[in-house]
Each structure stands twice: as structure tokens, then as C-alpha cells.
Image: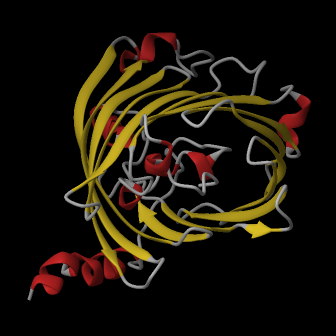
Amino acid sequence: MKLFIKIYALPVLVVLLLSNTKVAAQTEPMYSQYMYNMLSINPAYAGSREVLSMNMFHRKQWVGIAGAPQTTSITMDQSFNDKKVGLGIQMYDDRLGVEKAQGVNAMWSTRVRISENGILSGGLQFGAMNYRADLTKVENRFTPGDPAFTQNYSKWLPSVGLGLFYNTDKFYIGASMPNLMRTRLATFDMIKSGIRNVNDMHFFATAGYVYEINEQVKFKPSAMVKVVSGAPIQYDFNANFWLKDVIGFGVSYRTKDAVLGMVELQANRNFRIGYAYDIPVSDLKLYTIGTHEIMLRYEFSKDKTNIKSTRYF
């Protein structure tokens, strides 16, 4: 009975994650260093590092294009109850053109050990987002005096997400839907402009593995699949190398979008910094010099043995 109580949500999560969803736009923020920012896309990741961990990400996308996306995300999470429960929180600021989305998400995960090294987690996420659109700043309007573009819109919207995550010391795989509800596009119900209200649920699948080439070098391939109905399925393929568990560098390819280079530095056992640069391969390459992304992670532990020996995801 106790085991049932611990994992009762997992079959429900599987069914929901595999459900068919009709959508027509991609509105979830994009991250190049997703493998180090898993909590932002999968609530089941909460507590997986087993110490109080704080991450900060800032992404400036498509430099040179006015109104291009900019995203800042701060997350914190930790395991509790003898590492059987994970709790996390995320605060974010996401901007695109005249739109701004700021909010907070709370994550909860149940963690069940199913083998000597393997832990399966099911996670839920609840949050609220303030969506704002300054329509007075929309440029190149077909009708300059259109009353639909003479005011600002601001609305608080709820969010609910869920996910599954399985990991060992050297392997992980996860699936998630970070938002099951209507978000920013729903605000356009108030605008008589012909824009169609849709849901914008995203499905993410991630996986990665650490190969120990020798005592000094480790190779960590990873991949992410993003599915949004009405848009092409997008794949991220990544290959990272770690030298002496201190310096990591790698390359990625995001289908029909960009090639990426990234570098990570484990400054000490608590602090880590990372940087990624995206070079577009789509038609956007004619208009932008690329995308910058910075990652900072700090883990609060005075005892070195409390920090997971594998720090690759």
C-alpha cells in the first residue's frame, strides 16, 4: 500500500504525457543548455541533485532582430524526506516583441528507487503567469487607427504541468508537458483581430548518457525532442566532453534551426558557469548574428560527499 501511494500518480502521468493535443504555435521558452536546466521543462527533475541547487539562465535570442525573444529563469530545488520527495520553484521573465510573460512555478516530485542506482520520479507543477501585451507598440499595422491596437492588455493566467524522470549516476531519460493550460495566446480572445485562440501545449522528451573514456575524459551525448502540433517536430542532438570533471565543451544541432557551441566550467565543487552560442542555419542567418545563453549554478553544501559525484545533468 505504501508503494502504491508513492507511485499512484505515475500511470496517470504516462497517459497524459502521451495524449494527443491540438495546438498551433510554439510559446515555451527555448534553452540550448537544457541538460543543465531540466527543472524548467520537467517538474519531475525536482530534487534529483539531492542538495539545495540554484540555477540562473539568461538567453538573448537572435541578436540584431528587434523584439527578438529574451528569457531569464531562476530555479531552486532540493530533496526532502530521506530523498523521497523533491520540491522546486521557478521564477521567469520571458519577452517577445510587445509581449511579456512573468511568473512563478512550484514543483513537487515523488522519487521512488526502483533499482540499486535507478530512481523514477513523477512530478507536478503549478504556477501563475502575468501576461502583458503593449499593443500600442505594434509596428506596420494594416490600419494605423485600429482600436484593437490602442491599449495594453494584462492578465493573470494559471499553469499546470507534469513530467516523468528516470536517472542513474550515468543515464537519464524524461518526458514532460510543462504547461497543460491555455497561456498567452488566450489573451487574444479579448482582441477582435481575427487571431484564433489555441492551446499551446508542448511535449518534451530528453535523454543522456555519460561514457567514461578514461579517468580524465568523459563523453556525454544527449538529445531532446520537442513536439508541438501544427509545427515540425524539433530535435536537439548534443555531444559534450568533460576534462578532469572541471571543463566541459561540446556542440549541438537543432534541426532546421541552428548549430551550437557550448563550454562549461566547474569552478569549484559548488559553483558552475556555462555559456552557449547558437548560429542559425535557417533563413534567420540573414538577419541575426546568433544567440547568447549564460548559465550559473550554485549548490549549497559544505560537505563534498553530499554533492552528487556525477555533475553532468
Q: Position of residue 249 (x, y in %)?
A: 83, 44
Q: Residue at x 30, y 63 (%)?
A: 123
Q: Position of residue 287 (x, y in %)?
A: 85, 27
Q: Is residue 187 visible?
A: yes
Near-viewer residue (139 or 294): 294
Q: Residue at x 63, y 32 (%)?
A: 268
Q: Residue at x 89, y 46 (%)?
A: 281
The structure's colour scheme is secondary structure
Farthest residue, direction left: 1
Q: Position of residue 219 (x, y in %)?
A: 81, 62
Is 213 positioned to the left or the right of 264 in the image? right
Farthest residue, direction bottom: 1
Count of numbered circles in the view:
0
Is residue 209 placed above or below 257 in the rendered structure?
below
Quarter location, residue 233:
bottom right
On the rendered image, what quadrant is the N terminus found in?
bottom left
Is residue 237 placed above or below 125 in the rendered structure?
below
Q: Residue at x 35, y 43 (%)?
A: 77
Q: Is residue 199 visible?
A: no
Q: Position of residue 67 (x, y in %)?
A: 62, 20
Is residue 74 placed above or below 109 in the rendered structure?
above
Is 175 positioned to the left or the right of 97 in the image? left
Is 217 positioned to the left or the right of 148 in the image? right
Near-viewer residue (225 or 142): 225
On the rendered image, what quadrant is the C terminus found in?
bottom right
